[in-house]
Amino acid sequence: MKVVAARDVALYGALCAVATFDRSELRAGVIDNPNFRHFLELVPELREVIKDFYASRYSSCLKHLNAMRDDLLLDM
């Protein structure tokens, strides 16, 4: 049996959504989705990345991603 941590669901789900969804899909599938919002609450930095990306605040988005960089590099 394999188990995935809720934090990992938030992390990989959100990063894949930013990479592949258009704006309407990002809003419906991530930002306004109550089920996924629960996961985003586990990683507040990631929630800010999503909000900044959606609002076209790319500088702030990249700043938050850079702050998460060390933790992300630990995950193979």
Image (cartoon, rainbow, N blue to C red):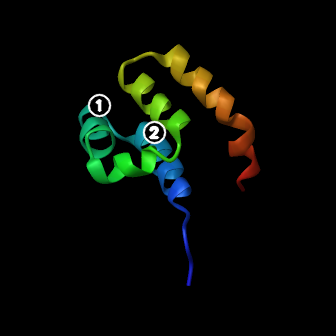
Question: Which corner quadrant holds the N terminus?
Answer: bottom right
Residue extending furthest toward the bottom? 1
Q: Position of residue 10 (x, y in %)?
A: 48, 50
Q: Position of residue 61 (x, y in %)?
A: 52, 23
29, above or below 18, in the image: below
Q: Residue at x 50, y 42 (%)?
A: 15
Task: Check residue 71 in the rendering and tell me which mark sits there, or answer none.
Answer: none
Q: Residue at x 49, y 18 (%)?
A: 58
Mark 1 is on which residue type?
Arg
In space, the residues marked 2 and 1 are separated at their CA atoms by 11 Å
Q: Position of residue 13 (x, y in %)?
A: 45, 51
Which sits in the foreground, 46 or 57?
A: 46
Q: Residue at x 46, y 35 (%)?
A: 47
Q: Which residue is mark 1?
A: 23
53, above or below 74, in the image: above
Quarter-of-image position of residue 35: bottom left
Which sits in the foreground, 18 or 36?
A: 36
Q: Dot 2 lies on which element?
A: helix
Mark 2 is on which residue type?
Ala
Q: Which residue is mark 2?
A: 19
Q: Dot 1 lies on which element?
A: helix
Number of marks present in the image shown = 2
66, above or below 8, in the image: above
